[in-house]
Image: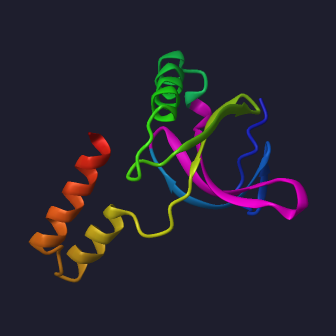
Amino acid sequence: MATGISNAYPMNFGPYVLTAKIAMGGMAEIFRAKSFGAEGFEKVVVIKRILPHFSEDEGFVTMFKDEARVAAHLTHANVVQVFNFDTVDDLFYIAMEYVEGRDLKRVLDVGAKFGKPLSIAQAVHVMIEASKGLD
């Protein structure tokens, strides 16, 4: 099985070009990527790709497929849109909307490092917006 896994970017991945790794978890990795179309059309997207050693785990693959199916039916300003679900070199991936900005974990980590946690108003705002997306 060819995995196409490398740390050199940009890197072709099926119909996308991976431009940078955003994060890596225990079961998947997240990339900033571009998709291309006619007349110079480009769109920045996120690719969530299952890690190779989980592609053989039927239970995890089922969970990943279920995640893609459920997320594809969600439409809300506070939930990223799913554009595609497919495989490249036997690795499942989800192509999603790219949202510019910092992730909450990073904001909280930097705040903790410098002794500047979110204010109560900021924390309440974050929870309200997250709740709207979950609703």
Of residues 116 and 119, the one drawn nearer to the viewer in this rendering? 119
Location of residue 57 with respect to 16 vertically, above or below: above
* Left or right side of 79 for 14: right
Q: Is residue 44 magenta?
A: yes
Q: Residue 50: x and y, percent?
A: 57, 36
Q: Position of residue 94 (x, y in %)?
A: 59, 39
Q: Residue at x 77, y 29 (%)?
A: 1
Residue found at the very far right of the displayed protein: 39
Boundaries of the magenta span: 26-53
Q: Tell me if residue 39 comes above or below residue 85 in the rendering.
A: below
Is 26 situated above or below 9?
A: above
Count the marks: how many? 0
Residue beneath the point at 55% across and 57% down: 98
The residue that appears at 26% across and 39% down in the rendered structure is 135
Residue 119, position as x, y percentages in the image: 13, 75
- Please give left or right for residue 4 compared with residue 66 in the image: right
User: Residue 80 appears at what percent x and percent y?
Assistant: 47, 49
Asked if residue 49 is among those painted magenta in the image, a careful observer would answer yes
As drawn, the residue found furthest toward the left would be: 120
- The structure residue drawn at horizontal position 52% and vertical position 45%, both measured from the top left corner, is 81
Is 124 placed above or below 85 here?
A: below
Q: Main secondary structure of the magenta part?
A: strand
